[in-house]
Amino acid sequence: MLELGLVSVSFRDRSPSEIIRAAARCGLSCIEWGSDVHAPCGDAGRLKSIKAECDGAGINCCSYGTYFRIGENSPEEIFRYIGAAKLLGAKILRLWCGGKSALEYTADEKKALFEDCRRLARAAEKESVKLCLECHINTFTDTPAETLELLESVNSPAFGMYWQPNQYKSETENYEYARAVCRQTEIVHAFNWQGDKKLPLALAKQTWQSYLSLFPGRTVLLEFMPDGRIESLADEAGALKEITEGL
């Protein structure tokens, strides 16, 4: 079965307690906690509190959404984030890879980036966690061929992917990217964006059924609301449940 949840950064202006209560009310089973606002890696007390509150509500801390950027952050910094993830009970850490499109990298830049990825993967293997790269525009993982090249070069069970559609690409292009990386993908971020316009997920039911058919048994997390309001979570969660029914 798909595990359905929420990315905490959807509601940066709300407290962890409010987010946990809202997720539980909507029947969501997990939350990815962001390191920027809700779950900073240096605040052990807050991390433990979030974990305890999630446990009490029957919510799984499925992943830690870091803003660690490979190629810009020092590889040694990853251990602070791994420690924070463990306090949350999360085995997956989300990372960003690079600071520009893969097609803009020189050969030397790509070689250095790949070596950083291999070092990080070795560290993750030793710590029994998995590092997963967000499929994000203006990072190295914004093109499927280069992403597969990176994953094959690293070749580690502790190094994988997230997937999300690119709101500036067509449904066909997004589907082909999803098909390319589906085996290496642990978590999918779900939203309905067309360019800069955020729309209700219910309006993209067939599109998302097509996407998610490629990701059986994966975790699917709602990311951002069409209007930014936590009150809209119930409708978005309901749409996601309807989309995933029968998958």
Image (cartoon, helix red, strand yellow):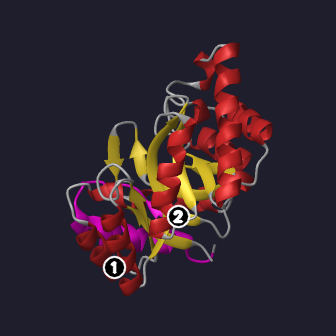
Q: Which mark is residue 53?
A: 1
Q: Which mark is residue 205?
A: none
Identify the mark nearer the N-term, 1 or 2. Answer: 1
Q: Quadrant of residue 14?
A: bottom left
Give the CA separation, mark 1 to mark 2.
21 Å
Closest to the observer, 188 or 34? 34
Classify 164 as above or below 112: below
Query: For the point 62% across and 66% down, which residue is it?
Result: 218
Query: For the point 39% across and 71% down, which residue is it?
Result: 237
For discs 1 and 2, the disc positioned in front in the rendered view: 1
Closest to the observer, 127 or 8? 127
Q: Residues within 10 Å of mark 2 (few under 14, many from 20)?
A: many
Give residue 146's position: percent from left, percent from top. Answer: 70, 30
| Identity, as a three-letter code, of the amino acid under mark 2 | Val
Closest to the observer, 218 or 48? 48
Q: Can residue 236 be found in the magenta stretch?
A: yes
Classify 159 as above or below 170: below
Give residue 24's position: percent from left, percent from top. Answer: 35, 80
Q: Which residues are magenta?
A: 220-246
Element type where label 1 sits in the image: helix
Say left or right for 190 vs 40: right
Give residue 20's position: percent from left, percent from top. Answer: 32, 74
| Identity, as a three-letter code, of the amino acid under mark 1 | Glu
Can residue 245 be seen from the camera position used here? yes
Q: Which residue is mark 2?
A: 220
Query: For the point 55% across and 25% down, which residue is it?
Result: 101
Name the quadrant of the N terminus. Answer: bottom right
Element type where label 2 sits in the image: strand
Can residue 225 be seen from the camera position used here? no
Say left or right for 158 vs 74: right
